[in-house]
Structure formats: structure tokens, C-alpha cells
Amino acid sequence: MKPSYYTTMKISPIKYILANDMDFCSANIVKYASRWKNKGTPVDDLRKIIEYANILMQYAMEEDNDKD
């Protein structure tokens, strides 16, 4: 069952995510970036992309600090 907002895409987000073995946050960024114009409230999806990107940045900064 594919939601209608994914049917016009050449490759579905789930296929891309699985093929690239993406982590949870990166996968959600792909999901929301793929559908933000076609589902629900676009600004909410864009905010979610930023939220997940901030989580990834925080994680990356913590990893960098652990290396020092």
C-alpha cells in the first residue's frame, strides 16, 4: 500500500532508504523531504526535516568531542 503522495516518484523513499541502509534520522529526512509539498501541512514537514538534521548535527558534534 503506497500513499498517493509517493506514487508519482521515480523511486519511493522506502526503497531509497533501504537500499542505502540509512539510519533513523536520515531516513526521516528523506521521507519528509520527499513529501513535504504533497501531504498535510508543508511547513510542519519542513520543520521536521530541520529537527532531524539538528539531532544528527548534535550527534556528530558529540562524536567529534569524544575523539578529542
Image: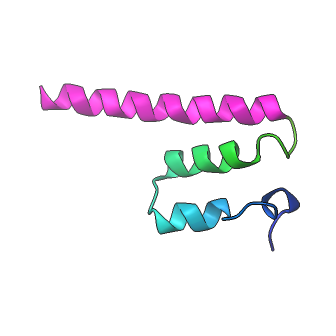
**In the orientation shown, which residue stands out farthest toward the left?**
68
Q: Quadrant of residue 36?
A: top right
Please, is residue 35 above or below residue 44 in the view? below
Left or right, 17 with respect to 44, comes to left
Q: Quadrant of residue 37?
A: top right
Residue drawn at x 67%, y 43% is 33
Q: Which residues are magenta?
A: 42-68
Residue 68 spot, x, y in % from top left:
12, 25
Quadrant of the snapshot with the N terminus: bottom right
**In the orientation shown, which residue stands out farthest toward the bottom?**
1
Left or right, 20 with respect to 5, comes to left
Q: Quadrant of residue 44?
A: top right
Residue drawn at x 23%, y 29% is 64
Left or right, 58 with respect to 49, comes to left
Residue drawn at x 69%, y 44% is 32
Residue 10 spot, x, y in % from top left:
70, 64
Residue 19 spot, x, y in % from top left:
49, 68
Near-viewer residue (61 or 5): 5
Residue 12 spot, x, y in % from top left:
68, 64
